[in-house]
Amino acid sequence: MENHKLVEKLQKETNINYKEASDALEKANGNLLDAMLYLEEKGKVKKPSVSVFYTNEYKENYKYREIIIKKDHENNYNNSKRRTNSGGVFEAVCKVIDICNNIFFEIKRENSILLRLPITVVIVLLMFVFWIVIPLFIVGLFFDMEFSLSGKREVTNKINNIFKLFSVNVKKVKEGLRKGFKND
């Protein structure tokens, strides 16, 4: 009897006939979620277009292909608004991390790349061991190392111009020191 209820539930949620729902559940050993995935793979049910899934707040409605927000009571509605805002913050943080993972910090010397790290790693290093990273950056400039960013973002060009400005100024300082030592 329970299998019959599962078949009806799957049929109702996916808008397919009873036999297809029964076959999908049989292939999935009675697991409703696996049956849904099986139907999606076979093309019987359209896959959700949403790339981020939420629990408790949203429910995918396969009949109308839209997200329905459940509003039971006024308190639950207010709580869901708070959770949605935190979800928005979480999504924004994930997006920033993804952007930073696709931009790379490169250390070059004589046009060969010595080290290439995602910006995310550089930020974490700066947060926890800045007293080592910043002096190494300055010392690297004095040893003719070039620093640059590579990625598909427009911001990388602006930051690369700043890095070049640092390199040019350090070279001027080095030349000034060399001339000062030669005159003594």
Image: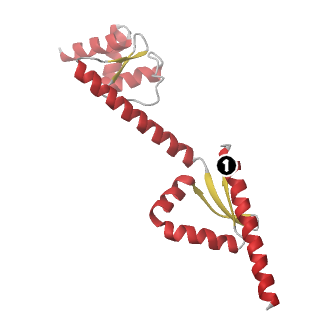
At a point 46% along the width and 24% down the height, the residue shown is 41
Residue matched to label 1:
156
Mark 1 Cα-neighbour bin, 10 Å: few <14, some 14–19, many ≥20: some
At a point 76% along the width and 71% down the height, the residue shown is 171
Above or below for 99 versus 41:
below
Above or below for 143 versus 114:
below
At a point 51% along the width and 56% down the height, the residue shown is 123
Q: Is residue 133 found left or right of 159 in the rendered image?
A: left
At a point 22% along the width and 13% down the height, the residue shown is 5
Quadrant of res 184: bottom right
SS of the residue under disc 1? helix
- Model colouring: secondary structure
Quadrant of res 61: top left
Above or below for 101 versus 111:
above
**x and y percentages locating residue 155 in the rendered image:** 66, 46
Q: Quick check: can you spot residue 37?
A: yes
Q: Quick check: can you spot residue 29?
A: no
Q: Can you name the residue that lies furthest to the left here?
A: 1
Q: Nearer the viewer, residue 138 or 47?
A: 138
**x and y percentages locating residue 1 in the rendered image:** 17, 14
Q: Is residue 164 found left or right of 41 in the rendered image?
A: right
Quadrant of res 13: top left
**x and y percentages locating residue 80 in the rendered image:** 30, 26
**x and y percentages locating residue 74 in the rendered image:** 24, 19
Q: Nearer the viewer, residue 177 or 14?
A: 177
Q: What's under tag 1, amino acid-wise? A: Thr
